[in-house]
Amino acid sequence: MADHVEELIAGTRAGRPRAVARLISLIERAAAEAAADSAASATLRRVMAGLATPGPDGREPYRARVIGLTGAPGVGKSTTTSMLVGELRRRGAKVGVLAVDPSSPFTGGALLGDRVRMQEHATDPGVFIRSMASRGHLGGLAWATPQALRVLDAAGCEVILVETVGVGQAEVDIAGLADTTVVLLAPGMGDGVQAAKAGVMEIGDVFVVNKADREGAQATIRELRGMLALGTAPWRPPIVATVASRGEGAADLLAALDKHHAYLAESGELARRRHARARDEIEQIAVASLRARIVRVHGDRRLDELAGRVLAGETDPYSAAAELVAGL
Amino acid sequence: MADHVEELIAGTRAGRPRAVARLISLIERAAAEAAADSAASATLRRVMAGLATPGPDGREPYRARVIGLTGAPGVGKSTTTSMLVGELRRRGAKVGVLAVDPSSPFTGGALLGDRVRMQEHATDPGVFIRSMASRGHLGGLAWATPQALRVLDAAGCEVILVETVGVGQAEVDIAGLADTTVVLLAPGMGDGVQAAKAGVMEIGDVFVVNKADREGAQATIRELRGMLALGTAPWRPPIVATVASRGEGAADLLAALDKHHAYLAESGELARRRHARARDEIEQIAVASLRARIVRVHGDRRLDELAGRVLAGETDPYSAAAELVAGL
């Protein structure tokens, strides 16, 4: 196992797609097992320690630009992501794509249709595409997502696109992971004012109105503009109209992303966001390791017994939790 | 403060709306402060301990039926909830409503329009209505939501309706909190197959196709039926057509909910779900208290310093987290 991990790290550093894919798989498995298995935790630690230092080519870690793309199902996130990959490739940038899937036993594989749209890039050695499950112990995004970003960063990706589905917690999580968050809307999906209700509007650094050739696109843009005019933050999010299925708007979108990146760098906000992200990650890992310790020390039986006592009215959940913590 | 808490608990037990509202507010504030303030934690513990035992009338805790309602923005959740409240009131049941809002500084108050639909019940002493913010440290639903359920339970509510917005983690969370989860769809919103993609289909115990007088309703029902036919679980979720704005389908919906409740009770699933819920709650409180201890022991400066070292490539997030945990 030890040599295996080192080998995968070295392969990742060299930008070999198979090593990148296998290292992310290893992280996913280890993250799922880490709560119950201290060997899995140790493996995760070794991988992260291996990726934290500058690479053999002197490339420092944490240099990749991370761009999150989010929006309701059906707005065209995968198509837009694919369009953006094409545009970045034309510039010669190495690109990583993480598609975060809300997987479930019932709907497993439902997103395969989307991934087909990515296939034009599947054989390009300068593009790493990976999908991950979105259910984790710590919110909408997979526990392993920040760590998968590290792997793609170490593989030399200059830009990483993180695409996620849904309206809700996943958006908030993606904003925590990304330097720039793109919120996608489409006309005629009730996504204008409705999106505002769901609380995703304030996480958008750049807005895309996709399917801009459809009826209602101008109305959606107007509504959005009116809403954004209420904001008071120093960065006023631009609105880009695209027809991603025909590649229209790719250059405009990339220009908007570059402008936001320049703003982040100049204002010091980029450093601030990355610092906050590192803090969150450390804190989450610490909390996860404490949670793992609860499970390891007490086991399932003890938790079951406490749950039974709470349900019987013999104790309350706070006192039960205090018993767990005191026993560590 | 001590007398105050006891007074609010006694008032809640007596079913006094003002005491219920103030106790939930107190829990919300304390939950927000508990990470940094051990007095807030102590208050929460006292409230929960006070509510955990049987009431003066002999009513045992954890007896309320908890019904979650979820679906994309615009499908008519608030209207359906309001219709259900009316139907339950006609039966004489005491009802609690928790509306979980995805609040944010930018969109704060955006749901006020919805709450107007609840106003017909606002003066009914047999109905407790409360909205809560949905952003918490531990996922889509507010940290304090399970505790607010306790308060409504102690106030004598026989049924508690929890309404939440969004497609994503909040749904998964609501399914963890509720005995029965209702997933709402509406025709012409791209919510059929699309909802399946977002992974909410498998959490529905009962499906509602609201706005069933609109074009496309039959197609939505057919599509849903085809999808549910793929399921292999012993409970086959029924589909109820409603026009909530006109009160149509209220009795059918309540009949479907009763049938599911009977199924849960007979199959032993009700006890299993409630046990799992109590376990989750204990574990989350334990983890939250450990997280609070990290903040209290190390303070912000230490976390900032570690984040800086990670960003500089001097350490990795796992080693940084291990330092935090070792210092407890």
Image (spheres, coloured by chain):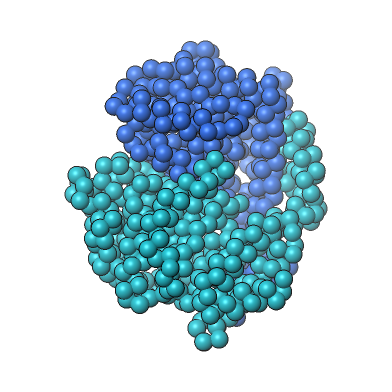
Chain colours: A blue, B cyan
The answer to whether A153 appears left or right of B273 in the picture is right
Check the picture and name the quadrant holding the C terminus of chain B.
bottom right
Q: Nearer the viewer, residue B13 or A179?
A: B13
Is residue A323 placed above or below B111 in the rendered structure?
A: below
Who's the residue at 40% across and 36% down the image? A192
Q: Residue B206: which quarter of the image?
A: bottom left
Relative image position of residue A43 (x, y in whole percent): 65, 44
Who's the residue at 46% across and 58% down the image? B99
Q: Is residue B140 visible?
A: no
Q: Nearer the viewer, residue A308 or B68?
A: B68
Check the picture and name the quadrant holding the N terminus of chain B.
bottom right
Relative image position of residue B178 (x, y in whole percent): 44, 64
Who's the residue at 34% across and 31% down the image? A187
Relative image position of residue A120 (x, y in whole percent): 39, 21
Q: Residue B18: which quarter of the image?
A: bottom right
Who's the residue at 66% across and 43% down the image? A280
Relative image position of residue B200 (x, y in whole percent): 38, 50
The answer to whether A221 appears left or right of B12 in the picture is left
Q: Nearer the viewer, residue A251 or A26?
A: A251
Q: Residue furthest front?
A: B123
Q: Nearer the viewer, residue A236 or A125?
A: A236
State the count of labels.
0
Q: Is residue B322 visible?
A: yes
The answer to whether A58 appears left or right of A72 in the picture is right
The answer to whether A7 appears left or right of A97 in the picture is right
Is residue A281 placed above or below B270 in the rendered structure?
A: above
Q: Residue furthest top?
A: A91
